[in-house]
Image (spheres, rainbow, N blue to C red):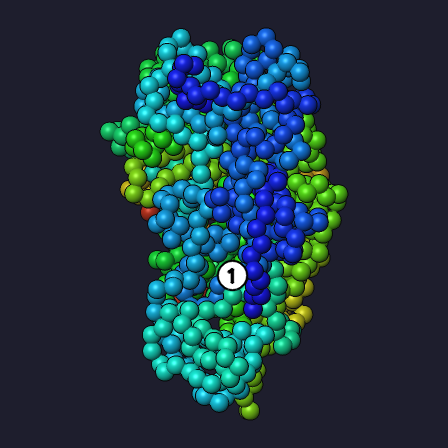
Amino acid sequence: MVQTREPITGKLCLVSGPMIGASGMLGVSMGEMLRVGTLGLIGEVIRINGDTVYAQVFEDTGGMMLGEPVTSLGYPLSVELGPGLLGGVFDGIQRPLEVLRAMSGDFIARGLTAPALDREKKWGFTPTVTVGQKVVGGDVLGTVQETRAFMHRVLVPPNVSGVIKSVVSAGEYTVEQPVVVLEDGSELAMMQRWPVKRPRPVVRKLPATEPFVTGQRVLDCIFPVALGGSAVVPGGFGTGKTVVEQTLSKYCNADIIVYVGCGERGNEMADVLDEFPALTDPKTGDSLMNRTILVVNTSNMPVAAREASVYSGITLAEYYRDQGFSVAIMADSSSRWAEALREISSRLEEMPGEEGYPTYLSARIAEFYERTGRAEVLGTVAEGEEPRQGSMTLVAAVSPAGGDFSEPVTQTSLRVAGGFWGLDAALAYRRHYPAINWKVSYTLYLETLKPWFRDNAPKGWLENRQRAMDLLQRDAEMQEIVQLVGPDALQDGERLILETGKMVREVFLQQNAFSDNDAFSSLEKTGGLLETLLEFYDLSKNAIENGVTLNRLMGLPVREDIARLRNESNANFADKRATVCARMRADVAAAATKKG
Amino acid sequence: MTGNNQTPAEAPLRAEYWDLTYISGPLVFLKNGGRFPSGAILELTMANGEVRQGQVLEASTSHAVVQVLQGTQGVDVKGASVSLKQDVATIGVSTALLGRRFNGTGVPIDGLPPAVVDKEMNINGAPMNPVARDKPNDFIETGVTAIDEFNTLVRGQKLPIFFGSGLPANEVANLIVQQARTRDASEQFVVVFGAMGITEREANYFMTAFDEGGQGGRVVAFINKANDPAIERVFTPRCALTVAEYLAYEMDYQVLVILTDMTSYCEALRQVSSAREEIPGRRGYPGYMYTDLSTIYERAGRIRGRKGSVTQMPMLTMPDDDITHPIPDLTGYITEGQIVLSRSLHRQGVFPPVDIIPCLSRLMNNGIGEGRTRGDHRQVANQLYSAYAQGLDIRKLMTIIGEDALSDMDKKFLKFAIQFERELIGQGWTRRTIDESLDASWKLLSLLPRAELTRIDTKYVDLYYKAGEETAAAPVS
Ligand SMILES: Nc1ncnc2c1ncn2[C@@H]1O[C@H](COP(=O)(O)OP(=O)(O)OP(=O)(O)O)[C@@H](O)[C@H]1O
Ligand SMILES: [Mg+2]
């Protein structure tokens, strides 16, 4: 929980962009929240020198005069946790943006405060504990139907335990009303607070064994990441990071999505807010917005709050993990967070590391990634019951300067993430979307996921994956030869590799995120499509060995049917595939009898 | 920053301070940081009576850092005094600004008296609440095929033009200003023009072009010329955008903001940063340039429940034709796509010389399709794009293996690519409606066999495709 101390008030003695200094603040500790100046802007202590503290301010500091009062609040930057988060849109320090709009209109004024959770709203609370019961951190005190599909579990905060003295009866309560009183007199309500920079504890981390299914063929089949894993998505501007983040938010198999728009565009958020409420959650059939929490700190919003936004986001995610859900965090873009660190660090005149980033950049990034994972969460395990589990999967976009992956944020993230989905400007220019470069991308989860794929994915999944990789590799080699000497130097068998390589790239790897039928590809469709392409390759190879020319095979009209197969909906796919495959076999066989 | 238009007689007596201690580049340092609010606009009065403007960048008990808009040439620490002019930088706004020309900080340069203003607004604006934003989705027809068909501009978008020096970027911008129309002709469409560090010749080109095209009355221009004080450039786009926001969100106009040249703006930013001895980022540009640029570019958009919109077309020179240079790079990371001009197309005499391969409009899908442009728009654009890319590959291959070694199909694509550049992109100064652009596209597609058009639904192919003579003759296996 959040510790508090009596406030301390001092005087403003420095204003430099997003950083301020205040003197007369002896007793204030690192990370404490401040209210700065007569406007009461919110800040966070980041350096202490004697009685002077330096703080980053989460709002624009223009117009402040030295000598204005600065008050410490006695507690660190924290978020409110409880029912009412799902479907919400918050800024980097968890102020609800709809409420801010009601307070200050279409543009955000300074010095506004508003609680993240509605204090008036009453929630239907059903207790699951009884008087005299001993509870520990993570135990479920009761449930609340948070959205149509989500049963929110009200938890005992991690570091609290005791014996229940009284508990309310089922009924409607606000988030602040105590629902349980412990013997020691402490009152527990539906809402708790947690400091964002401190990870919420778990019993232990568990190995990740199930895939994070995204409906994207190149991800699910070629570079799968585990539920509880993490993936870095670096790419130059316009290569498709945001489309990946948004598409995954729509279709992935996590229960809850925390989408952190960190220093990116306002219009993209307008897009999400326009689109998500109308889409359906693939798991529950309810509105997609009801499984989503948006933390939005667009690029033109104060830079320090950008830094806070990723922490706010991950803490909200941890809270739902602790309830036993699988949560996916989309961070777009983690580079903007790193840049915010750099900006503040340079104001502090810290000695810069690589490319001006502070030397603690890699430590911060590593700590952040470490908060993800699959875990056995806190709480008493009843006899004969399995411990509750939850997971947090992170997909972090990285925006490298000049699209060059050798820069520090990409490199540091790669050291700690298990999946690397590298986006390539050359592919994006060719409108090969998603522009994931299969030559450089990788996943470290394949081995641990193999058993799952063997048991649950369409037959031949792993073998076909390997064959596709080999084919793409040879395709790349052949292309190099063609670049040097032209296509005439190749035999028909080699040119077949080029032709099928192209089909794998264009039909299988490419996937239009805006296509009605193909934005989400089920595992069955993904497996079936690849199987079809590989079968075409095998049949053709065989035919060529029997003297059929490549030109004849490439002229077969069934090729167009294969190309259009991916536009079939997931539901119709199997039938259509059967028809196309039958035709393919017949046509290739017919070509073989004609020869030449 | 027209300031409060008070005459000296009615202005309250202002305290003056002889506080200067140190001068570096465009900055002066004051002894006492406690006198003025951060961000305040000061007046710096020199010994000879000349008055300049400055802005407080940093204040601490030991000093204040002030950037002087007109530079520090001739300023000395003993003779100059400072006094507070305004707590924040503001600009006076009203519809009377339409048709007017100002310098980079809002002083009239058209020989007319200051415009009557409705109110003063803070030039830094405030961040738009993301939940207040309305999704940009109305097609703006620029009449330029390379934009309308392939990189559609929609209202509320920020779409920059990247170009190498010497390319006809101004002409392209002018073409767009002259020709742009929104679907609903009754809407009031105005232009706010912010120029940073442009030459006299360029300034004249634009002003004459606007007047001759009859646009003069609907243009507000803020012009900081190459020989004007460089630091003023930091203010110019903010003045322009404040006026644009006023016209859009309070007066219901559809506003197109042209900002040129953002490269000069960034250089001014770099100059201030280096004078402050900040740790430089890539190529000496400050580490906060992304944040700074976003406070300009993000001021495009639409607001729920309001009629007007701010659409931005920033223009910038890519130093060395390098799109990975920090200025185009950071811009691309903020804007919603980019239009890129090509030197090689320009050499071939193609106008507008738009290289569609690196171009992108991220909001295109919101503005096109049935009911907006035409049902076949997206697919035709995709098909042409991919056929052109293929044609370019073949052109490259040809330089290795020679034209004779190309297959018949290769030759078709090659011919297609050449005509695509010459005819479709190189439309010259003729305006095309989106229908005319699409019709011209189908004509070009007739160079290719029908079987190649896999990116277009058969229903559209049946409707629009007419095989060309050569392709019709070729048997389909
Ligand atoms: N899977 C996809 N299907 C179709 N189009 C795509 C896909 N991925 C990307 N695009 C196209 O690429 C454009 C740019 O993508 P996106 O906005 O995701 O880039 P980004 O990497 O987030 O860029 P930035 O770093 O500037 O934010 C999209 O607007 C869309 O037109
Ligand atoms: Mg993006």
Quadrant housing residue A6? bottom right
Q: Is residue A279 above or below residue A490?
A: below
Towards the viewer: A576 or B264: B264
Residue B284, position in %: x, y?
A: 69, 31
Quadrant housing residue A2? bottom right
Residue A564, position in %: x, y?
A: 44, 54
Drawn side of residue A198 relative to residue B187, left or right: right
Residue at image coords 33%, 35%: B249
Count the labels in the image.
1
Quarter of the image for the N terminus of chain A: give it: bottom right
Towards the viewer: B252 or A474: B252
**Tag 1: amino acid:** Val
Residue at image coords 71%, 41%: A349
- In terms of secondary structure, where does tag 1 sit? strand
Look at the image and tell me whether residue B286 can be seen.
yes
* Residue picked out by circle 1: A79
